[in-house]
Amino acid sequence: MCGRYASTLPPEMMVELFKLIKGLDIIPRFNIAPTQPIVAIWEAQGQREAHFARWGLVPGWVKDPREFPLLVNARAESMAEKPAFRDPLKHGRCIVPASGYYEWHTGPDKKKQPYYITRADGQPMALAGLYATWSGPNGEEIDSVATITVAANAQLSEIHDRMPAILMDRQQQDEWLNVREVRAAEAAQMALPLEEGVLKFHPVSTRVNSARDDDAGLIEPITLEKPAPVLKKAAGGQLDLF
Protein backbone atom coordinates (compact mmCIF):
# COMPACT_ATOMS: atom_id res chain seq x y z
CA MET A 1 0.00 0.00 0.00
CA CYS A 2 -0.18 2.19 -1.97
CA GLY A 3 0.80 0.21 -5.06
CA ARG A 4 -1.30 1.62 -7.93
CA TYR A 5 -2.84 4.98 -8.66
CA ALA A 6 -4.34 7.13 -11.41
CA SER A 7 -3.35 10.62 -12.52
CA THR A 8 -5.54 12.30 -15.09
CA LEU A 9 -4.89 16.00 -14.44
CA PRO A 10 -4.34 18.07 -17.59
CA PRO A 11 -0.91 19.76 -17.61
CA GLU A 12 -2.37 23.26 -17.38
CA MET A 13 -4.45 22.31 -14.32
CA MET A 14 -1.39 20.80 -12.64
CA VAL A 15 0.53 24.05 -13.20
CA GLU A 16 -2.27 26.09 -11.63
CA LEU A 17 -3.02 23.81 -8.67
CA PHE A 18 0.58 23.28 -7.63
CA LYS A 19 2.00 26.68 -8.62
CA LEU A 20 4.55 25.28 -11.05
CA ILE A 21 6.83 27.50 -13.13
CA LYS A 22 6.14 25.15 -16.04
CA GLY A 23 4.34 21.89 -16.72
CA LEU A 24 5.20 18.59 -18.35
CA ASP A 25 3.85 17.06 -21.52
CA ILE A 26 1.81 14.26 -19.95
CA ILE A 27 -1.16 12.09 -20.84
CA PRO A 28 -3.87 10.72 -18.53
CA ARG A 29 -2.82 7.52 -16.74
CA PHE A 30 -5.28 5.16 -15.05
CA ASN A 31 -3.03 2.39 -13.74
CA ILE A 32 0.38 3.67 -12.67
CA ALA A 33 2.55 0.90 -11.19
CA PRO A 34 5.87 0.74 -9.32
CA THR A 35 9.10 1.15 -11.34
CA GLN A 36 7.23 3.22 -13.94
CA PRO A 37 8.01 6.93 -14.53
CA ILE A 38 5.70 9.14 -12.52
CA VAL A 39 5.24 12.89 -12.14
CA ALA A 40 6.62 14.33 -8.90
CA ILE A 41 6.85 17.95 -7.79
CA TRP A 42 9.65 19.45 -5.72
CA GLU A 43 11.38 22.77 -5.14
CA ALA A 44 14.94 23.70 -6.12
CA GLN A 45 16.52 27.14 -5.79
CA GLY A 46 13.14 28.49 -4.75
CA GLN A 47 11.36 27.27 -7.88
CA ARG A 48 8.73 24.58 -8.00
CA GLU A 49 8.90 22.19 -10.93
CA ALA A 50 7.38 18.90 -12.03
CA HIS A 51 9.78 16.08 -12.89
CA PHE A 52 9.57 12.55 -14.21
CA ALA A 53 10.94 10.11 -11.64
CA ARG A 54 11.01 6.35 -11.09
CA TRP A 55 8.43 5.11 -8.59
CA GLY A 56 10.65 3.16 -6.24
CA LEU A 57 13.22 5.17 -4.30
CA VAL A 58 16.95 4.61 -4.84
CA PRO A 59 19.05 6.43 -2.20
CA GLY A 60 22.13 8.24 -3.43
CA TRP A 61 24.47 5.97 -1.45
CA VAL A 62 23.36 2.79 -3.26
CA LYS A 63 26.13 1.21 -5.33
CA ASP A 64 23.96 -0.75 -7.78
CA PRO A 65 20.22 0.03 -8.09
CA ARG A 66 19.64 -3.38 -9.67
CA GLU A 67 20.60 -5.05 -6.40
CA PHE A 68 18.59 -2.73 -4.14
CA PRO A 69 15.05 -3.61 -2.95
CA LEU A 70 12.06 -1.76 -4.36
CA LEU A 71 11.13 1.05 -1.93
CA VAL A 72 7.71 2.08 -3.20
CA ASN A 73 6.32 3.27 0.16
CA ALA A 74 7.80 4.83 3.28
CA ARG A 75 5.97 4.32 6.57
CA ALA A 76 5.40 7.70 8.24
CA GLU A 77 5.98 6.19 11.68
CA SER A 78 9.53 5.04 10.91
CA MET A 79 10.77 7.11 7.95
CA ALA A 80 12.84 9.46 10.14
CA GLU A 81 14.92 6.50 11.38
CA LYS A 82 15.27 4.46 8.18
CA PRO A 83 18.60 5.15 6.41
CA ALA A 84 16.92 5.14 2.98
CA PHE A 85 14.37 7.80 3.97
CA ARG A 86 16.13 9.88 6.62
CA ASP A 87 17.93 12.28 4.27
CA PRO A 88 15.05 12.60 1.75
CA LEU A 89 12.76 13.59 4.64
CA LYS A 90 15.17 16.44 5.39
CA HIS A 91 16.09 17.54 1.89
CA GLY A 92 13.98 15.65 -0.66
CA ARG A 93 10.29 16.07 0.07
CA CYS A 94 7.96 16.02 -2.92
CA ILE A 95 4.32 15.81 -3.96
CA VAL A 96 2.90 13.16 -6.27
CA PRO A 97 -0.29 14.44 -7.99
CA ALA A 98 -3.04 11.82 -8.24
CA SER A 99 -6.69 11.61 -9.18
CA GLY A 100 -7.21 8.55 -6.99
CA TYR A 101 -5.54 5.35 -5.91
CA TYR A 102 -6.36 1.65 -5.77
CA GLU A 103 -6.39 -0.69 -2.83
CA TRP A 104 -7.27 -4.37 -2.50
CA HIS A 105 -9.60 -5.83 0.11
CA THR A 106 -8.89 -9.46 1.01
CA GLY A 107 -12.07 -11.42 1.69
CA PRO A 108 -12.57 -14.54 3.82
CA ASP A 109 -12.08 -16.62 0.67
CA LYS A 110 -8.64 -14.95 0.25
CA LYS A 111 -9.75 -13.33 -3.01
CA LYS A 112 -8.71 -9.71 -3.46
CA GLN A 113 -11.23 -7.14 -4.66
CA PRO A 114 -9.78 -3.84 -5.91
CA TYR A 115 -11.33 -0.50 -4.92
CA TYR A 116 -10.75 2.94 -6.37
CA ILE A 117 -10.39 5.66 -3.72
CA THR A 118 -10.77 9.39 -4.34
CA ARG A 119 -11.40 12.60 -2.46
CA ALA A 120 -15.09 12.98 -1.67
CA ASP A 121 -15.07 16.57 -2.93
CA GLY A 122 -13.76 15.49 -6.34
CA GLN A 123 -10.53 17.46 -6.03
CA PRO A 124 -7.14 15.98 -7.02
CA MET A 125 -4.93 14.39 -4.40
CA ALA A 126 -1.49 15.61 -3.38
CA LEU A 127 0.32 12.51 -2.12
CA ALA A 128 3.23 13.23 0.21
CA GLY A 129 6.44 11.70 -1.12
CA LEU A 130 10.20 11.56 -0.79
CA TYR A 131 12.68 11.77 -3.66
CA ALA A 132 16.36 11.08 -4.15
CA THR A 133 18.80 11.36 -7.04
CA TRP A 134 21.20 8.50 -7.67
CA SER A 135 24.36 9.24 -9.65
CA GLY A 136 26.18 6.41 -11.41
CA PRO A 137 29.89 5.97 -12.13
CA ASN A 138 29.43 6.98 -15.77
CA GLY A 139 27.58 10.20 -15.01
CA GLU A 140 24.08 8.76 -15.32
CA GLU A 141 21.40 10.00 -12.93
CA ILE A 142 18.13 8.49 -11.70
CA ASP A 143 15.49 10.56 -9.92
CA SER A 144 13.28 8.29 -7.85
CA VAL A 145 10.34 8.60 -5.46
CA ALA A 146 8.63 6.78 -2.60
CA THR A 147 5.14 7.70 -1.48
CA ILE A 148 4.43 7.92 2.26
CA THR A 149 1.81 5.80 4.01
CA VAL A 150 0.03 6.18 7.34
CA ALA A 151 -2.39 4.05 9.34
CA ALA A 152 -5.83 3.98 7.72
CA ASN A 153 -8.68 5.81 9.39
CA ALA A 154 -11.73 3.79 10.46
CA GLN A 155 -13.48 4.33 7.12
CA LEU A 156 -10.57 3.14 4.98
CA SER A 157 -9.64 0.30 7.32
CA GLU A 158 -12.67 -1.52 5.91
CA ILE A 159 -10.46 -2.09 2.86
CA HIS A 160 -6.86 -1.96 4.09
CA ASP A 161 -4.91 -1.03 7.20
CA ARG A 162 -2.73 1.58 5.43
CA MET A 163 -3.44 4.64 3.30
CA PRO A 164 -1.27 7.25 1.57
CA ALA A 165 -0.42 10.47 3.38
CA ILE A 166 -2.46 13.12 1.55
CA LEU A 167 -1.76 16.85 1.85
CA MET A 168 -5.26 18.31 1.77
CA ASP A 169 -4.71 22.06 1.40
CA ARG A 170 -2.28 24.49 -0.21
CA GLN A 171 -0.69 25.54 3.10
CA GLN A 172 0.21 21.93 3.89
CA GLN A 173 1.61 21.46 0.41
CA ASP A 174 3.70 24.64 0.63
CA GLU A 175 5.14 23.67 4.01
CA TRP A 176 5.86 20.09 2.93
CA LEU A 177 7.87 21.29 -0.07
CA ASN A 178 9.68 24.02 1.87
CA VAL A 179 12.73 22.00 2.88
CA ARG A 180 14.74 25.19 3.47
CA GLU A 181 12.62 26.38 6.40
CA VAL A 182 10.43 23.48 7.53
CA ARG A 183 12.47 20.85 9.34
CA ALA A 184 11.99 17.12 9.00
CA ALA A 185 10.34 16.73 12.42
CA GLU A 186 7.77 19.41 11.58
CA ALA A 187 7.10 17.93 8.16
CA ALA A 188 6.60 14.44 9.60
CA GLN A 189 3.70 15.79 11.68
CA MET A 190 1.82 16.47 8.45
CA ALA A 191 1.81 12.79 7.48
CA LEU A 192 -1.33 11.78 9.36
CA PRO A 193 -4.52 9.79 8.64
CA LEU A 194 -7.37 11.86 7.24
CA GLU A 195 -10.63 12.58 9.00
CA GLU A 196 -13.64 10.37 8.32
CA GLY A 197 -15.64 11.24 5.21
CA VAL A 198 -12.83 13.03 3.36
CA LEU A 199 -12.41 10.09 0.97
CA LYS A 200 -14.85 7.83 -0.84
CA PHE A 201 -14.39 4.50 -2.62
CA HIS A 202 -16.08 2.00 -4.90
CA PRO A 203 -15.25 -1.49 -6.24
CA VAL A 204 -13.65 -1.71 -9.68
CA SER A 205 -12.72 -4.39 -12.18
CA THR A 206 -9.91 -6.82 -11.43
CA ARG A 207 -8.43 -5.74 -14.77
CA VAL A 208 -6.47 -3.22 -12.71
CA ASN A 209 -4.42 -6.16 -11.41
CA SER A 210 -2.52 -6.12 -14.69
CA ALA A 211 -0.26 -3.11 -15.24
CA ARG A 212 -0.72 -3.67 -18.99
CA ASP A 213 -4.28 -2.37 -18.72
CA ASP A 214 -4.42 1.42 -18.58
CA ASP A 215 -7.73 2.95 -19.63
CA ALA A 216 -10.61 4.97 -18.18
CA GLY A 217 -12.74 1.86 -17.68
CA LEU A 218 -10.53 0.81 -14.77
CA ILE A 219 -11.89 3.53 -12.47
CA GLU A 220 -15.56 2.87 -13.28
CA PRO A 221 -17.62 1.33 -10.43
CA ILE A 222 -18.82 -2.25 -10.73
CA THR A 223 -21.56 -4.14 -8.94
CA LEU A 224 -20.33 -6.97 -6.74
CA GLU A 225 -22.18 -10.26 -6.84
CA LYS A 226 -22.26 -10.29 -3.05
CA PRO A 227 -21.66 -7.38 -0.70
CA ALA A 228 -18.03 -7.19 0.41
CA PRO A 229 -17.60 -8.22 4.05
CA VAL A 230 -16.34 -5.52 6.37
CA LEU A 231 -13.00 -6.22 8.00
CA LYS A 232 -11.74 -3.55 10.32
CA LYS A 233 -8.17 -4.71 9.86
CA ALA A 234 -6.99 -6.25 6.59
CA ALA A 235 -3.95 -8.48 6.92
CA GLY A 236 -0.90 -7.61 4.85
CA GLY A 237 -1.03 -5.63 1.66
CA GLN A 238 0.47 -5.06 -1.75
CA LEU A 239 4.01 -3.62 -1.76
CA ASP A 240 3.77 -2.69 1.93
CA LEU A 241 7.50 -2.98 2.55
CA PHE A 242 8.27 -0.65 5.45
Image: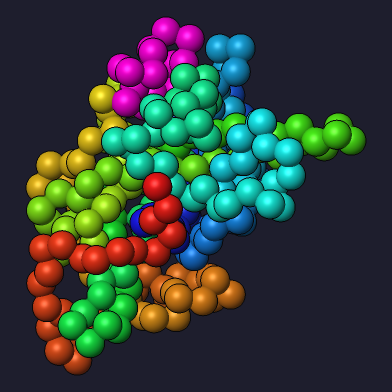
Report the front residue among 37 and 151: 151
Classify 118 as above or below 93.
below
- The percent coordinates of residue 210 (x first, y second) are 51, 76
Residue shown at 61% from the left, 56% from the top: 36
Q: Is residue 176 magenta?
A: yes
Residue shown at 39% from the left, 64% from the top: 238
- Relative side of 27 to 82, left or right: right
The number of discs equals: 0
- The percent coordinates of residue 57 (x first, y second) are 57, 42
Can the viewer see residue 214? yes
Can the viewer see residue 51? no
Q: Is residue 183 magenta?
A: yes
- Relative side of 11 to 4, left or right: right
Q: How is the protein colored in the picture? A: rainbow
- The percent coordinates of residue 143 (x first, y second) are 66, 37
Classify 125 as above or below 22.
below
Q: Main secondary structure of the magenta part?
A: helix
- Relative side of 46 to 79, left or right: right
Residue shown at 44% from the left, 80% from the top: 207
Classify 228 as above or below 211.
below
- Magenta span of residues: 173-188
Taking the view exactly as shown, the residue that stands out farthest to the top is 181
